[in-house]
Image (tube, rainbow, N blue to C red):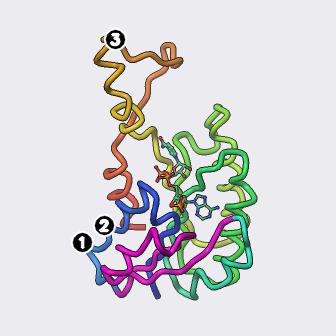
Amino acid sequence: MSIVVTGATGQLGRLVVDALLDTVPAESVVAVVRDKAKAADLAERGVELRIADYDRPETLAEAFGAGDRVLLISGSEVGQRVPQHRAVIDAAKAAGVAQLAYTGILGGPEADFTLAEEHKATEELILASGLPYTFLRNGWYSENYTANLAPVLAHGAVVASAGEGRVASASRADYAAAALPC
Ligand SMILES: NC(=O)c1ccc[n+]([C@@H]2O[C@H](COP(=O)([O-])OP(=O)(O)OC[C@H]3O[C@@H](n4cnc5c(N)ncnc54)[C@H](OP(=O)(O)O)[C@@H]3O)[C@@H](O)[C@H]2O)c1
């Protein structure tokens, strides 16, 4: 049984793997990545790499093992994510994983903004799979704002389209830490 993180070479995935390596032996951690070279540093730290692409279901057949605890980090291609996530869920089901955690979005089924649609559809696919699951309904990354600090400081204003809406953000590192018990 391994703890398997998809999207492990992404910004959130790397933080999850870092946090895992602080708490469990490297031999129990698996990184599912599509670019082996990009994950060389993870392999050097003792993490097993499994190469797979959400767009190529056949590559996902070896990504998971029976009893694995899997964190599916949502894909980054808006509009492509439902078929991509379906392929991952199907592979997890076929492998007989023990737990599937998914990084969805704040609000779950009640979320009424466009970006939530693919996350809601993914949650429905996971529920239909019958797999034990955890939904990590992340809010906005604080880094969405801090990455843009230069113009904010230059103009003395955060310009956005939220109107009176409020945003609860947290750092990627906090979301990564929150994912660990899953
Ligand atoms: N809450 C928020 O504010 C917020 C903001 C932006 C995105 N998100 C969502 O949260 C996810 C993680 O955020 P992040 O900052 O870590 O994003 P990121 O740095 O762009 O990482 C995305 C990860 O997904 C992997 N990936 C993308 N397409 C894939 C495919 N077809 N097959 C296999 N892996 C694939 C990427 O692989 P490579 O390393 O090979 O590129 C990367 O590791 C995003 O993908 C997006 O769904 C949330």
How packed mark 3 is, by other alpha carbons closer than 10 Å (few <14, some 14-19, many 20 or more), is few
| Residue annotated with mark 1 | 22
Viewer-nearest residue: 50 or 132: 50
Where residue 168 sits: x, y (%)? 40, 33
Viewer-nearest residue: 46 or 178: 46
- Asked if labels 1 and 2 touch by Cβ distance under 8 angstroms, the answer is yes
x 38%, y 80%: residue:
43
Q: State which mark lies toward you, 3 or 1.
A: 3
x 66%, y 69%: residue:
88
Question: Where 151 falls versus 16 (above or below)?
Answer: above
Where residue 94 sits: x, y (%)? 70, 82
Local secondary structure at mark 1: loop
Where residue 5 sits: x, y (%)? 47, 70
| Residue annotated with mark 3 | 155
Amino acid residing under circle 3: His
Mark linked to residue 18: 2
Where residue 101 sits: x, y (%)? 52, 64
Amino acid residing under circle 2: Asp
